[in-house]
Image: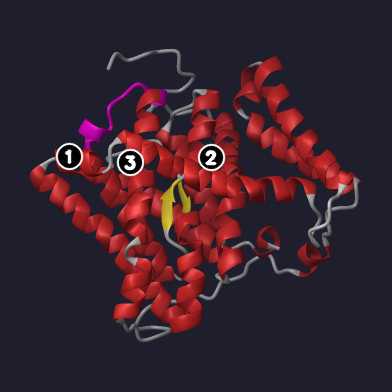
Amino acid sequence: MSQQRDFVLDIHDKPKAVNWLTLSLQHLFAMFGSTVLVPFLVGFSPAIALISSGVGTLAFLLITRGQIPSYLGSSFAFITPIIFAKASFGPEETMVGCFLAGLVYGIVALIIKGTGINWIMKLLPPVVVGPVIMVIGLGLANTAVGMAMNDVKGNYSLTYLMVALVTLAITVACSIFFKNIISLIPVLMGIIGGYIFAYTQGLVDFSKVVKAEWIEIPHFYVPFVTYTPSISLGIVLIMVPVAVVTLSEHIGHILVLNKIVDRNYIEKPGLHRSILGDGVATMLAALMGGPPNTTYGENIGVLAITKVLSVFVIAGAAVFAILFGFVGKINA
């Protein structure tokens, strides 16, 4: 591919300190809602999900040799399997199932390394991968609309809709009408502006924040330390097949990234490295007690909007996620 140079920051460009801070925070908050929503829905710790997403992203960047600017967060594809597995086998064995799903990624990566990519591209071509991603996205659309229009009791709320529209309007305005740093952080500005507006509407309650400690250590599920891992055929049948779905999602995200950054990541650093990085991130999350990780479309969207592709910005967001996981007031 020809290398376009209309990027604000290319893959290995280092931003200035202040810009680095704001750009990394933008990536953090772009993935924040989804990453903490998954553990909230399945009964895991949002703090551990944040920490494991940061650790997983750093591992991904290391394995892909710092060439793919992807952030990894909690996977929505595992929500139903995790809920079913927890009810049937308990949280500890569910963690083992999540680890096995990540292990599938590693096995596929080794096979691709040895045999090439032709077989998996035939098995999961773009015409198959595209609809899979659409189904995942459309499945979440109803949730997004509901969160934008309904209150916590599920009743339609004009106030909630106003906050959603104000947040969207600020994001769009910052992206289109502003220049310099504001135009590079429209998502962050939208979140800040929307949060402030929500506070003026009485939708923000700081009582739990006031009571929370500054530093809190979440309860990690560490195998052979906090529990003795066990495995059954049932947990394998529930969790492992989901890896096929998330593999499709991963390949789709890489293909989209190819278009955005004008590179071919399938060839360099190679699909096997990106799949291995995703699998290692999921296995690390399982070893901590967090949900499986996956490359995030939200953060790919931020890349497309801002043209800031720097892996240093992605790494900064990962570090912030790890730190935030230990801050009780932020979690509250």
Going from N to C along the chain, the mark reached first, 1 or 3, is 1
The disc label shown at residue 117, or none: 1
Residue 115 drawn at (x, y percent): 9, 45
In this view, 149 is above or below 98? above
Tell me the residue that label 3 is attached to.
251
Residue 70 visible from this viewpoint: no
Tell me the residue that label 2 is attached to.
298
Decide: marks 1, 2 in contact (CB < 8 A)? no
Mark 3 secondary-structure assignment: helix
Q: Residues within 10 Å of mark 3 (few under 14, many from 20)?
A: many
**Residue 7 horizontal side relative to residue 26, left or right:** left
Q: Is residue 268 magenta?
A: yes
Specify the quadrant of the image occupied by residue 209: bottom right
Quadrant of image for the N terminus: top left
**Residue 188 horizontal side relative to residue 233, left or right:** right
Q: Is residue 251 magenta?
A: no
Q: Which residues are magenta?
A: 260-270
Residue 94 drawn at (x, y percent): 42, 75
Q: Residues within 10 Å of mark 2 (few under 14, many from 20)?
A: some
* Pick the front one: 206 or 251: 251
Residue at the (64%, 22%) spot, across then down: 183
